[in-house]
């Protein structure tokens, strides 16, 4: 009789398997795909390590004029600092393949961070594009916000003015800031999926 | 030593001198686009509208972007600085190209681009020159991106009469090439389960004749995926495009964009269209070439299906048919031998029959649930899947062949119980009590999958398009139907009494039943031979010998110490691994040339589209090596000279698609007609008439009738 029970249990388990999260591209409202990566100091970092904290993922390429727009104006650095005061974890991710624009070694990445006065919690090196493909990261910058429970609550552009013009930052609506404010206040993020703009991520293919 | 330093000094001076030239001008990054402003006329009359164009000459290999740049990038923007009363219209965008960038896609232009703009002047203009200036900002990319801007200016004298300039020719050409309003109607529908959209257009004026390619460029971001390929179906004046949903997963009331049609000669024409969202999925098949069907490609007119049957309307029907199909599966040759054995032991075992029955049921249900889970997971992952797909893997076929061979050996009495891993399958089913029944249930289910019986075809195909709960329900119904007969036997005492009493005859019967198992193994090796050729057969042969040796050795070492006992299963596994490695690397099989009077062309979607656009009638037969129904149908209905002559005189092209190995085009066609497995017989009568699906059991008469009635009722082909 016990074997019968285990047989029924197996059947039930397979039923549960079908409710498992999709393996496809990330979706707002679903768990953010977990990943393991090495940061610029060689340390291994996992997204699930940060459960209990809000996490921002920022895809970057320092040669891209759109990234430069937000760094030369200190827009990105200010956002990072403000997020840090709220206890938000900021992960800057470089998915450029070796030889492509934006690719950096760990030391170069640390140097760049100092130079541009940025303050991410870590810079993740993703030269094989694994995390980039996992999140379907398309542009630099491309922003994702994950809440403390590990659910993806925002994905898309940093703001709503898709230009390289620094002057547009002032008048643009910053989606990342709005998302972080909403999550903090316990509200639903209003513009949860927006158009990411920038240069294409320089994957290896 | 001094000489070395001197030499160094001179060479560095020389290098510095050489670079003076480039240092002479203030450092300016190299431009990748040269921009100027050209006008259609050399002078302008007050009140007249003047067409000007911003001309971008783009460095080869680089590109600028369309109004919707796609996954990345930014379109050209023109900020005009015009005299009072003079206004500029919007940019008139030419049809863009798709520019793939790795996993992304952009929409843009290469080489030379004319962005036309209409400048309107007021009726009163001061005499003299009109200065039209603008700041043009754009992003130009190759592998990296550079934002550039250019200031452009032209001055045009105000005169009584405007005169054409040297640029009038190119501007007129560009104007002619601009997208126009789509002549026809357009609608689209959403399939949330598959995250896809279907755009359906009905074109007037023979627009779709001779079209080689069609692509839809959305105006807004996020509704349509940019890099996803767009499968097209053209029939007469109808075009259907399968689009993948974009990130935003929005389904607006109208989908706006540009439909670009490419002719056989490479000529591209763009059409602006606004597709209204409808609830019904669009289908092909216009009634007559002269009718103007309504914008709502209504779901009522589905493609007609000959001989009744067809897609079950509604989940309940599908579940019912799945249950019936499951019942019938018990009779299939790949399943029956395994079952017959188990049915007898009901009468002899010590355990409660009810428990055995439930265990069997559980085994079957678990297997089908796992199938459903696999299909659902793989479907999520985007793999185009069909029932029987696992039989496209040569390793799976080889492994199953070996399993049946070993089971046959055990039935023949050549293999004793508990002998090694090579006979794990058999020993599992022979486990005492309920465990044995559970695994029998699982084994029977695995073997049943390629035998797609008539009732199953439609139900499983329907299941594939349903969300997860529908898929699960249908496959479970299939499993329940499959398990029902054996289960009923276990439950009903009276029926059990009907079963013959155990005796010596059982041993004989058991040995006889080994032969259907050997036959199944042989058939699987034949399937393998199609997939992997004679090398695969050799590998299978050697594997069989290896496994047989292992089985014999296992029998000899039954009472030996454990290390010795392990030799046999080790050999068995090694043989299987050897066979599997050959199976995966062996080339494609010798396609058995069928002595057919009817000449078949290999199926490809491109060929089908080509024939359809030529208006020719086409008979499509989708088959596979493991599909017994297909082979029987071919032998009965498609082999004779009568059929060959009928096809020939009606000018019907016979396309045969072999699904023995993975073929995404065939899988897509199966899905289009709501099927998940073979066989599928579709007759396209040509000239825009609706496709007709034939039943899964063919007879010669049926095929001939189908051809004759369709040829007779042909609408007169569209006149020259």
Image (tube, rainbow, N blue to C red):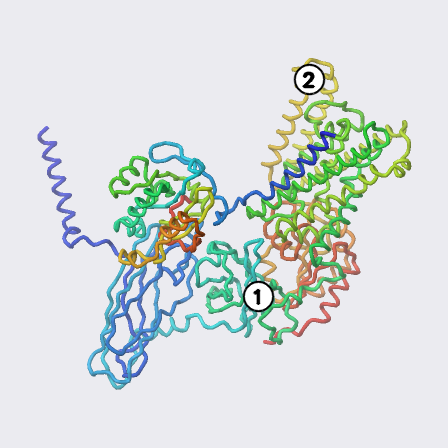
Q: Is residue B170 visible?
A: no
Up the image or down, B709 lies above or below B419; here it is: below
- The residue at the point 47 percent across, 50 percent down is A28
- The residue at the point 76 percent across, 33 percent down is B437
Secondary structure under the numbered disc 1 in the rendered image: loop
Q: Which mark is residue B359?
A: none
| Image side of residue A128 versus residue B655, left or right | left
**Percent position of residue B646, x then y:** 74, 63
Up the image or down, A72 lies above or below B435; here it is: below
Q: Which mark is residue B278?
A: 1
Return the residue at label 2.
B565
Q: Residues within 10 Å of mark 2 (few under 14, many from 20)?
A: some
Residue at the front extreme, as displayed? A185
Chain at numbered mark 1: B
Q: Residues within 10 Å of mark 1 (few under 14, many from 20)?
A: some
* Earlier sequence position, callout 2 versus callout 1: 1
- Please tell me which residue lies in front, A66 or A181: A181
Q: Quadrant of residue B178?
A: bottom left
| Image side of residue B188 versus residue B411, left or right | left
Mark pair 2, 1: CA separation: 67 Å
Chain at numbered mark 2: B
**Percent position of residue B77, x then y:** 32, 64
| Image side of residue B307 versus residue B294, left or right | right
Up the image or down, A37 lies above or below B551; here it is: below
Mark 2 vs mark 1: in front? 1
């Amino acid at each position: 009789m016990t074997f019968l029970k285990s047989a029924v249990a197996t059947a039930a388990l397979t039923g549960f398997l079908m409710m498992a999260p999709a393996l496809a591209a990330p979706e707002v409202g679903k768990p953010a795909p977990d990943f393991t990566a090495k940061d610029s100091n060689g340390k291994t970092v996992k997204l699930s390590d940060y459960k209990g904290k809000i996490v921002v993922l920022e895809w970057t390429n320092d040669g891209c004029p759109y990234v430069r727009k937000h760094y030369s104006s200190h827009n990105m650095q200010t956002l990072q600092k403000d997020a840090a005061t709220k206890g938000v974890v900021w992960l800057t991710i470089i998915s450029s393949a070796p030889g492509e624009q934006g690719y950096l070694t760990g030391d170069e990445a640390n140097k760049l961070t100092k130079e541009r006065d940025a303050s991410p919690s870590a810079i993740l090196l993703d030269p094989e594009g694994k995390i980039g493909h996992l999140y379907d990261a398309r542009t630099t910058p491309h922003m994702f916000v994950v809440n403390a429970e590990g659910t993806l609550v925002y994905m898309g552009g940093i703001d709503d003015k898709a230009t390289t013009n620094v002057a547009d930052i002032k008048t643009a609506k910053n989606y990342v800031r709005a998302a972080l404010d909403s999550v903090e206040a316990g509200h639903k993020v209003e513009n949860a999926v927006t158009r990411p703009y920038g240069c294409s991520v320089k994957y290896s293919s | 030593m001094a000489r070395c330093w001197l030499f160094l000094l001179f060479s560095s001076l020389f290098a510095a001198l050489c670079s003076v030239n480039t240092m002479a001008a203030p450092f300016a990054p190299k431009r990748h686009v040269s921009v100027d402003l050209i006008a259609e006329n050399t002078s302008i009359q007050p009140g007249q509208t003047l067409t000007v164009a911003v001309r971008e000459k783009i460095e080869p290999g680089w590109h600028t972007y369309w109004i919707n740049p796609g996954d990345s990038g930014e379109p050209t923007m023109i900020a005009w600085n015009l005299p009072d009363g003079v206004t500029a219209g919007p940019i008139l965008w030419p049809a863009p190209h798709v520019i793939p960038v790795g996993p992304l896609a952009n929409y843009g232009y290469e080489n030379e681009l004319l962005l036309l703009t209409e400048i309107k002047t007021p009726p009163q203009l001061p005499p003299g020159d009109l200065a039209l200036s603008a700041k043009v900002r754009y992003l130009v990319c190759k592998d990296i991106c550079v934002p550039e801007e250019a200031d452009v200016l032209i001055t045009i004298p105000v005169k009584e009469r405007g005169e054409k300039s040297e640029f009038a020719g190119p501007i007129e050409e560009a104007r002619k090439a601009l997208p126009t309003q789509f002549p026809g109607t357009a609608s689209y529908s959403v399939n949330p389960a598959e995250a896809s959209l279907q755009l359906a257009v009905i074109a007037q004026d023979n627009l779709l004749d001779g079209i080689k390619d069609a692509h839809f460029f959305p105006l807004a971001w996020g509704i349509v995926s940019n890099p996803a390929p767009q499968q097209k179906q053209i029939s007469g004046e109808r075009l259907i495009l399968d689009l993948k949903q974009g990130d935003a997963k929005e389904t607006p009331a109208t989908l706006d964009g540009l439909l670009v049609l490419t002719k056989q000669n490479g000529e591209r024409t763009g059409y602006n269209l606004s597709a209204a969202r409808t609830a019904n999925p669009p289908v092909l098949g216009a009634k007559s070439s002269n009718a103007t069907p309504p914008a709502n490609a209504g779901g009522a007119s589905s493609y007609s299906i000959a001989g009744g049957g067809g897609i079950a309307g509604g989940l309940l029907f599908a579940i019912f048919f799945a249950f019936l199909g499951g019942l019938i599966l018990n009779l299939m040759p790949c399943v029956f031998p395994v079952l017959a054995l188990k049915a007898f032991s009901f009468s002899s075992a010590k355990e409660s029959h009810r428990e055995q029955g439930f265990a069997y049921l559980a085994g079957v249900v678990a297997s089908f649930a796992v199938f459903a889970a696999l299909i659902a997971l793989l479907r999520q992952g985007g793999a185009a899947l069909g029932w029987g797909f696992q039989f496209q893997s040569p390793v799976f076929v080889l492994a199953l062949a070996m399993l049946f061979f070993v089971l046959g050996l055990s039935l023949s009495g050549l293999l004793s119980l508990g002998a090694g891993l090579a006979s794990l399958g058999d020993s599992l089913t022979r486990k005492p009590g309920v465990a044995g029944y559970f695994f029998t249930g699982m084994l029977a289910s695995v073997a049943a999958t390629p035998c797609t019986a008539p009732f199953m075809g439609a139900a499983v195909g329907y299941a594939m398009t349903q969300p997860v709960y529908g898929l699960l329900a249908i496959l479970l119904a299939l499993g329940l139907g499959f398990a029902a007969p054996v289960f009923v036997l276990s439950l009903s005492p009276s029926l059990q009494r009907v079963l013959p009493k155990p005796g010596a005859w059982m041993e004989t019967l058991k040995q006889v039943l080994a032969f259907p198992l050997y036959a199944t193994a042989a058939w699987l090796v034949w399937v393998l031979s199609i997939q992997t050729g004679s090398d695969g057969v050799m590998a299978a042969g050697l594997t069989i010998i290896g496994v047989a040796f292992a089985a014999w050795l296992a029998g000899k070492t039954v009472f030996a110490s454990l290390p010795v006992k392990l030799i046999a299963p080790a050999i068995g596994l090694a043989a299987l691994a050897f066979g599997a490695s050959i199976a995966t690397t062996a080339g494609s099989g010798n396609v058995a040339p069928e002595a057919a009077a009817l000449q078949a062309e290999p199926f490809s979607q491109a060929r089908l589209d080509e024939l359809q656009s030529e208006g020719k009638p086409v008979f499509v037969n989708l088959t596979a090596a493991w599909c017994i129904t297909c082979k029987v149908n071919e032998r009965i209905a498609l082999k004779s000279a009568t059929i060959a002559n009928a096809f020939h005189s009606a000018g019907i092209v016979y396309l045969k698609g072999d699904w023995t190995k993975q073929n995404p085009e065939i899988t897509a066609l199966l899905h289009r007609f709501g099927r998940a497995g073979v066989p599928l017989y579709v007759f396209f009568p040509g000239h825009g008439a609706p496709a007709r699906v034939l039943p899964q059991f063919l007879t010669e008469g049926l095929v001939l009738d189908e051809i004759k009635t369709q040829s007779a009722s042909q609408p007169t082909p569209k006149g020259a």
